[in-house]
Image (cartoon, rainbow, N blue to C red):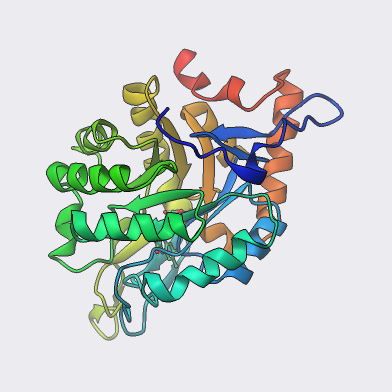
Amino acid sequence: MRTEGGVGAETRPSERSAGGWALEVELAGLRLANPTVLASGVLGTSASLLARAASSGAGAVTTKTLTLHPRRGNPNPVVVELDTGLLNSMGLPNPGLEPFLPEIRAYRSSGLRSPLIGSIWALNSEEASTMASMIQEAGANAVELNVSCPNASKDELDTIGSEQLVRELVEAVRRSVSVPVFVKLPPLHWGLTKLAGAAVDAGADVLVATNALRGMAIDVRARRPILSGITGGLSGRALKPVALRAVYELYGEFGDEIQVVGVGGVQDWRDAVEYLLAGASAVEIGTALIYRGLSVFRRVASGIEGYLREEGFHSVEEIVGAARRG
Ligand SMILES: Cc1cc2nc3c(=O)[nH]c(=O)nc-3n(C[C@H](O)[C@H](O)[C@H](O)COP(=O)(O)O)c2cc1C
């Protein structure tokens, strides 16, 4: 392990519940009180919202993806609610990295235990390196390199699927920070293991699977796409089987070298346990927060604990990847 992620308050000794079922997990050296993580883009836009997620039971929190320069994002409409999930074409709106750094510092000085993962989107190695150093300096416990935003512009979207670019970006981040490097992947089928392999070779510590799936919706009366960005990222329930398959494949291919985090459609403990069994060491939660509120973190965590107890396990680690072992 190349990292020194387990620093500060996150390295408290394991806290086992009275029955002996521990929810605590280690992710690239970071200690999480339970395996639920706030996904990027949903709530992580300020220190106070990150803190609310952590106080509501998230084992770790991820910031909204930040870019070096401010981005306005797409004009409205940017969200369509579907019966199977949510389509969004936000387009990475954010104030730019520098103005956001005080939010990271404020979160870190709040005393909350849940590690903070800083999400960044960079267009080249130089940007990636600068941003990663700045975000680590501000106190982020890990950097999540987003190479999979479904709402980037056409040119930017070329990152998705470009092994060479992913390799360069991950190498640049790896060289610039000592905290763990997470790489957030798209829900590709063909090419996913090659793209992930480039990230692993370049020194990533954790693979996060997956970002939203590109989709669209059409207004039949207006006879045109509903989203201003035409296409958007599909998240929520419809994404779960796709992201679950990605986790299972990545764990099978790289599980001996690297940890995987599952994200896509986690609404309850069953969804989370499926991801753990497929090979995820933790799960990120996004869309479910919009429909079910912040109590999702505690409900999912206590449901996982109940499952461990009922099935006779004593730690989350015991079930990670169990579906591959039969
Ligand atoms: C409104 C919205 C905004 C998002 N913004 C980001 C983002 O800035 N960066 C990122 O990596 N993922 C972003 N995502 C994707 C989520 O982090 C997550 O990968 C995806 O939604 C699947 O998880 P879920 O089904 O639990 O939402 C966003 C998702 C939604 C719904």
Q: Nearer the viewer, residue 233 or 177?
A: 177
> Horizontally, is 175 left or right of 14 in the view?
left
Q: Nearer the viewer, residue 229 or 170?
A: 170
Q: Nearer the viewer, residue 52 or 181?
A: 181
Query: Residue 155: where, in percent of width, then height?
Result: 12, 64
Query: Residue 231: where, in percent of width, then height?
Result: 26, 68
User: Farthest top residue?
Assistant: 326
Residue at horizontal 37%, vertical 23%? Answer: 257
> Horizontally, is 282 left or right of 205 in the view?
right
Total marks shown come to 0
Quarter location, residue 90: bottom left
In which quadrant of the rendered image does the N terminus lie?
Answer: top left
Residue at horizontal 68%, vertical 49%? Answer: 113
Residue at horizontal 23%, vertical 49%? Answer: 169
User: Farthest right residue?
Assistant: 18
> Horizontally, is 250 left or right of 57 in the view?
left
Quarter location, residue 120: bottom left
Query: Residue 157: where, in percent of width, then height?
Result: 18, 60
Quadrant field for ligand 1: bottom left
For the question of whether residue 233 can be seen, the reply is yes
